[in-house]
Amino acid sequence: MGHSHKHTSDHTGRNLLISILLNSVITLAQIIGGFLSGSLALLSDALHNLTDVISLVISYIAARLSKKKATISRTFGYKRAEIIAAFVNASSLIIIAIYLMFEAVKRFFNPQTIEPDLVIGLSILGIVFNGLSVLLLKKDSAHSINIRSAYLHLLTDMLASIAVLIGGLLMRFYQIYWVDAALTIAIAVYLVVVGYNLLKESFHILMLFTPKHIKIDAIVEEVNKLEHINNIHHIHVWQLNETEIHLEAHIDFNVDLKFSEFNTILKTIETTLFQKFNINHFNIQPEFGSSDPKTIIIQD
């Protein structure tokens, strides 16, 4: 049963390249500014921006790879490249967040004087550039876990730049320098939250877990309603990528069907499961009088 699948468009690829350029400029400016001003929050923002650039490059490469055609040696092509990219990007968010927390705690016990004017200026630059990148990727982030991983990097960095701006203003007008470390911790905690959710989602797909919206018992109930079917068993349901959900199962028939009759029932099964569960790839093994175990789930 064939269905169309979404691929990353050339338009999306161009937006990723623009975002890479914008964030490279921000990263360089904030690294220089962070050392000159002594601001840990600004340096943490720069470090996160560096991971943005890396994540965007990874996302761009993965998007390009996902378009490659299947071959004899790669029968699925590179359809999982974008899921791997999302997993790597989510992991980097969490690792960076932990490092920032460690550095912020050290800064609490060893506060330093910070030049707030430079912090304010560069944080505004970060808000503008990251904001543009967020707008460029927002639409595509709804349809691709890969683009969403890059989008979340950019969104959290835009929020981080807003936090740094607030901190810079407080330091400029009220000389509250501890806020630099406090904002760093707040940024890091937010990164852990969004990174964990994305990491869990991509891990779920990579481990071939059953998609969350699919209930195996409901599939069994629907298939067993059909004429001539004793039961469906030995079921595997997994997600290859965001657009392809596969089902593999054995079906025990109570009559010795002709191939033409089986094809008619198979078409009904595929249509039903596609409409109700969005499963779009099927591998059904028909059985009649077979003595194999009939349990729904069998560990291969």
Image (cartoon, rainbow, N blue to C red):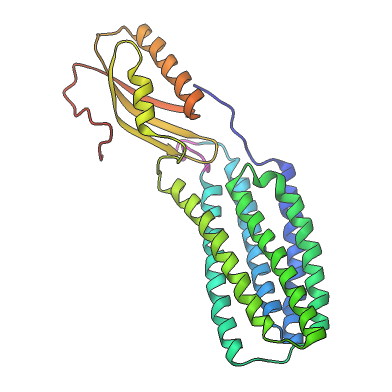
Relative to residue 235, is residue 103 depicted above or below?
below
**Residue at 46% of width from left, 35% of height from top?**
72
Query: Residue 273's x, y, as percent?
Result: 45, 24
User: In the displayed image of the protein, which residue is found farthest to the front?
Assistant: 174
Instruction: Give the tally of numbered discs.
Output: 0
| Highlighted magenta segment, given as a residue range | 71-79
**Residue at 66% of width from left, 76% of height from top?**
183
The image quadrant that residue 176 belongs to is: bottom right
Q: Nearer the viewer, residue 73 or 238?
A: 238
Query: Residue 152's x, y, as percent?
Result: 64, 57
Residue 41, magenta (yes or no): no
**Residue at 61% of width from left, 87% of height from top?**
107
The image quadrant that residue 293 belongs to is: top left
Residue 72, magenta (yes or no): yes
Q: Main secondary structure of the magenta part?
A: loop
Q: Nearer the viewer, residue 74 or 102?
A: 102
The image quadrant that residue 265 belongs to is: top left
Relative to residue 38, is residue 298 depicted above or below?
above
Q: Nearer the viewer, residue 238 or 56?
A: 238
Query: Residue 119's x, y, as percent?
Result: 78, 79
